[in-house]
Amino acid sequence: MPEPVEKIALLILGWLFGLLSPAIVTGIQRRREVRALRATILRELNDVRYQVVSAVYLIDVNQGTTTRGNLEWVRLHHSDFANKDGVPKLLDAIRQMLGLNDEGIAFLAQDGRAKTAATPALKNYSTPILDSNFASFSYLDHKLQSALMEVRLRLSLLNQNTEEYRTYFQLTYSNQPEQSNRDRIHGNVIMALTAFKQQAIRVADAIREVQSLVNGS
């Protein structure tokens, strides 16, 4: 290549590099920010997952509704939290229960249920990090965006279930209702508790799908 042409080519390359450098740097920074955002959101969501899985397990224990399928589901999720206090003992207890036949599991479930008509307390769940970074979802993979939207929807529905349950639960403290009304109120409490449990299962599974997408990317 003649020297003048080579100099011109180098000048053009230098000019192009100068134009592209900010975009390259911005792209690298954005990828780093996205990785950090995904990790932070996942930590928050896994904390929620641990809590809702624990709530589902406690509801089954309280109501005597533990089954083999329920135990396997709890084990699947809590295996991701084996470093948390108490989880290894719980997983060991679940392993022992799964060693029984279905009749044995049913017997232990009924034997360990609450002896009165008591029902467990439920709470609302919040994800401030996820919510405050909603505008940044556009930088994430489309599948991950959809999965996070699914989690937000399921959590909203779960919190609605909690409020419905609390409404019915408060009615149990009304001034000595007739037996027929008391039975109806308790039935509504159990129905709301069941709805909460079903939605909590969907929340936990949706968060586990987010974890799978983050870890696989």
Image (spheres, rainbow, N blue to C red):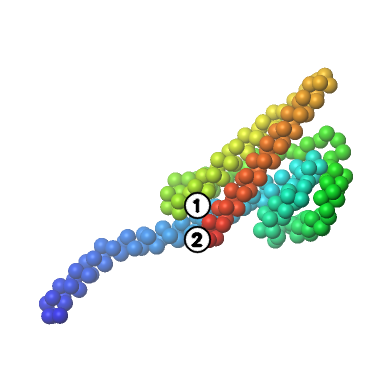
Q: Residue furthest bottom?
A: 2
Mark 1 in CB contact with mark 2 (< 8 angstroms): yes
Q: Amino acid at mark 1?
A: Leu
Name the residue at 46% across, 49% down.
137
- Asked where in the image residue 6 lies, by quadrant, the reply is bottom left
In the rendered structure, the answer to whether residue 48 lies left or right of residue 110 reads left
For disc 2, the marked residue is 217
Please tell me whether mark 1 sits on a helix, a strand or a loop. helix
Please tell me whether mark 2 sits on a helix, a strand or a loop. loop
Q: Which of 131 and 190 lies nearest the eye of the viewer? A: 190
Number of numbered markers: 2
Name the residue at 16% across, 76% down.
7
- Asked where in the image residue 58 lies, by quadrant, the reply is top right
Residue 9, percent from left and from top: 18, 73
Name the residue at 30% across, 64% down.
21
For disc 1, the marked residue is 144
The quadrant the N terminus occupies is: bottom left
Real-space CA distance between mark 1 and mark 2, rounded to the nearest whole angstrom: 10 Å
Residue 64, percent from left and from top: 81, 42
- For the question of whether residue 65 can be seen, the reply is yes
Crowd band around label 2 with a 10 angstrom C-alpha radius: few (<14), some (14–19), many (20+): few
Name the residue at 73% across, 50% down.
69
* Dot placed on the residue nearer the N-terminal end, 1 or 2: 1
